[in-house]
Image (tube, rainbow, N blue to C red):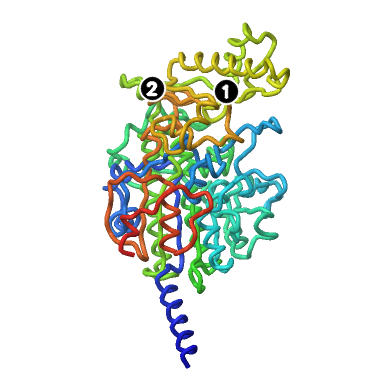
């Protein structure tokens, strides 16, 4: 009888624990979103999108990336592993593979094949990600009974958040206008994905006109529509509204053009709602996880810059996408049964030319082949006939190590001489803030402050270059007088939103400094599961305490 009572108590305890956990977690990443956008565009938001998260959830106003480079691949990996590139290994969207002597993509996997389109970019998987993710840990904790689905326009935005154990990840194939996957996940697209693709929504959007959601006179938070700092599509004289996609599509890559408009977000939001229903997410006994990464804000932001009406319009429209998604979650899962967090994979720099025209420091730093040729020419006096710089990526230089593989009595000295020469040369260049050699970074601590600490946390000794450098504030690598990018250690690239909303989340906000790596361990505590294997972040106590 006593044994039976104990079993009953255990059963009740487990039932109560299950009730405390959300039925579904939705992790939303907005590609290239500043925290500042929440304030600047707030008056244009409705009450049930961003404002629902801001007013009814918990918002961190001083959240940052704590490493460089601040790019899409590393950002998504860091959010979901609770770690940084030094540990999870995703040091960029691409990097130089020393052994193969080729550039490799962060999710590229030649062993995989596309599912859903024979010619699509389906040779991908998360195999280069060296840590587990919060989604992996959820699968492990439930004996793989939890369902994990990742979706995005970009393949890396779907694959890295979903982790190694995901049931599936889906991304948009711009050749066919369909969502596809790879053999890493599935052998065939499920019926709900096939049915969604059959709607041909991408084709519908391509035959539309992109005009402002509100009357253009109301876009007072942005600069003029006819701006000299915005890139033009082929077939237009000026980068101004409206944009006739039907007329422009053939000269601008068809579906590639569509995802450079807010219609890319519309398409993904609709796909997210289809995934909820098609996968029965949040309907089982275990917590499920849906990751959604909106890519179009990044693609538009690169072309137009953060002060463009185009960027403001994409966020006004994204706000309505979120409202629709939250309403669907309310009806499909239940308002008290799900938890949402929203963040960004990085923020964005101002267009350097606009800074210069306003007499603010900034500029475009020459990179790529031109930089390699310049450095190799400079080194000819000391190393005649040799090309020491093999490649440059992510503000890092890769040496041709074969040239230092000779007599060990001299090769080590040659390497030191080359490193010192290049370091001093780069440090003298306009726009360069600091330069660090591999040996210097090895001596740095993981928790070191300043630019060096940011580089250390983003530096993986097996994958990163031999010399790393950081540009001055307002400077970007490459580019011209139009458009901009991201990737630096400065606050305009690091300060991103972190908002939690839903089951188990109290209302409030905090200006305490937090890093992006704190999201995953916070979820681990809320779910009562292990932290991801490479996790370096800490639970957000303002949310966790009292739970």
Q: Position of residue 26 (x, y in %)?
A: 45, 59
Q: CA distance from mark 1 to mark 2?
A: 19 Å
Given residues 148 and 409, the one toward you in this image is 409
210 relative position to 153: left or right: left
454 relative position to 35: left or right: right
> In the rendered view, would you say 454 is above or below 206?
above
Given residues 492 and 165, the one toward you in this image is 165
Q: Which type of secondary structure does the marked residue at label 1 adopt? A: loop
**Residue at image coords 59%, 36%:** 94
> In the rendered view, would you say 410 is above or below 2?
above
Q: Please tell me in which quadrant of the rendered image residue 222 appears.
A: top left
Q: Position of residue 375 (x, y in %)?
A: 58, 15
- Mark 2: give few (<14), some (14-19) or many (20+) Cα within 10 Å: many
> Which residue is labeled 1 in the image?
368
Mark 1 and mark 2 lie on one chain; the one further toward the N terminus is 2
Q: Position of residue 408 (x, y in %)?
A: 70, 20
């Amino acid at each position: 009888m006593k044994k039976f009572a104990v079993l009953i108590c255990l059963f009740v305890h487990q039932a109560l624990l299950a009730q405390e956990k959300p039925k579904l977690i939705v992790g939303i990443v907005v590609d290239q979103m500043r925290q500042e956008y929440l304030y600047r565009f707030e008056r244009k938001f409705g009450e049930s999108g961003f404002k629902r998260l801001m007013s009814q959830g918990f918002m961190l106003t001083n959240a940052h990336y704590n490493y460089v480079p601040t790019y899409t691949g590393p950002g998504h990996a860091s959010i979901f592993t609770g770690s940084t590139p030094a540990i999870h290994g995703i040091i960029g969207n691409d990097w130089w593979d020393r052994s193969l002597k080729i550039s490799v993509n962060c999710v590229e996997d030649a062993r995989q094949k596309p599912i859903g389109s024979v010619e699509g970019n389906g040779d991908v998987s998360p195999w280069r990600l060296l840590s587990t993710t919060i989604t992996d840990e959820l699968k492990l904790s439930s004996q793989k009974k939890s369902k994990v689905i990742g979706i995005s326009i970009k393949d890396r935005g779907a694959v890295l958040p979903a982790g190694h154990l995901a049931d599936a990840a889906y991304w948009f194939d711009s050749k066919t206008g369909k969502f596809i996957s790879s053999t890493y996940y599935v052998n065939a697209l499920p019926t709900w994905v096939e049915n969604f693709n059959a709607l041909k929504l991408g084709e519908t959007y391509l035959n539309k006109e992109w005009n402002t959601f509100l009357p253009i006179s109301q876009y007072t938070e942005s600069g003029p529509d006819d701006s000299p700092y915005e890139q033009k599509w082929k077939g237009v004289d000026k980068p101004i509204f409206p944009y006739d996609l039907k007329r422009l599509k053939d000269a601008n890559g068809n579906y590639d053009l569509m995802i450079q408009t807010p219609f890319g977000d519309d398409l993904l939001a609709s796909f997210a709602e289809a995934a909820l229903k098609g996968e029965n997410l949040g309907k089982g006994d275990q917590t499920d996880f849906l990751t959604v990464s909106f890519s179009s804000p990044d693609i538009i932001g690169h072309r137009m810059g953060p002060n463009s009406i185009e960027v403001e319009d994409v966020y006004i429209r994204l706000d309505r996408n979120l409202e629709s998604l939250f309403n669907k979650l309310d009806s499909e899962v239940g308002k008290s049964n799900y938890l949402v967090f929203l963040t960004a994979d990085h923020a964005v720099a101002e267009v350097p030319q606009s800074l210069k025209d306003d007499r603010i420091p900034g500029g475009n730093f020459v990179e790529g082949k031109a930089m390699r040729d310049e450095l190799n020419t400079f080194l000819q006096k000391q190393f005649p006939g040799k090309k020491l710089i093999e490649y440059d990526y992510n503000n890092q230089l890769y040496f041709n190590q074969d040239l230092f593989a000779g007599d060990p009595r001299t090769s080590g000295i040659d390497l030191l001489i080359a490193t010192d020469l290049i370091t001093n040369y780069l440090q003298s260049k306009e726009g360069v803030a600091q330069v660090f050699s591999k040996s210097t970074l090895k001596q740095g601590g993981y928790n070191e402050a300043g630019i060096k600490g940011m580089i250390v946390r983003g530096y993986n000794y097996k994958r990163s270059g031999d010399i790393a450098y950081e540009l001055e504030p307002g400077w970007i690598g490459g580019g011209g007088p139009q458009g901009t990018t991201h990737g630096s250690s400065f606050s305009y690239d690091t300060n991103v939103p972190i908002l939690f909303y839903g089951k188990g989340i109290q209302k409030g906000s905090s200006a305490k400094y937090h890093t992006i790596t704190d999201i995953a361990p916070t979820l681990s505590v809320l779910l009562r599961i292990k932290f991801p294997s490479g996790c370096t972040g800490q639970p957000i106590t303002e949310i966790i305490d009292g739970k």
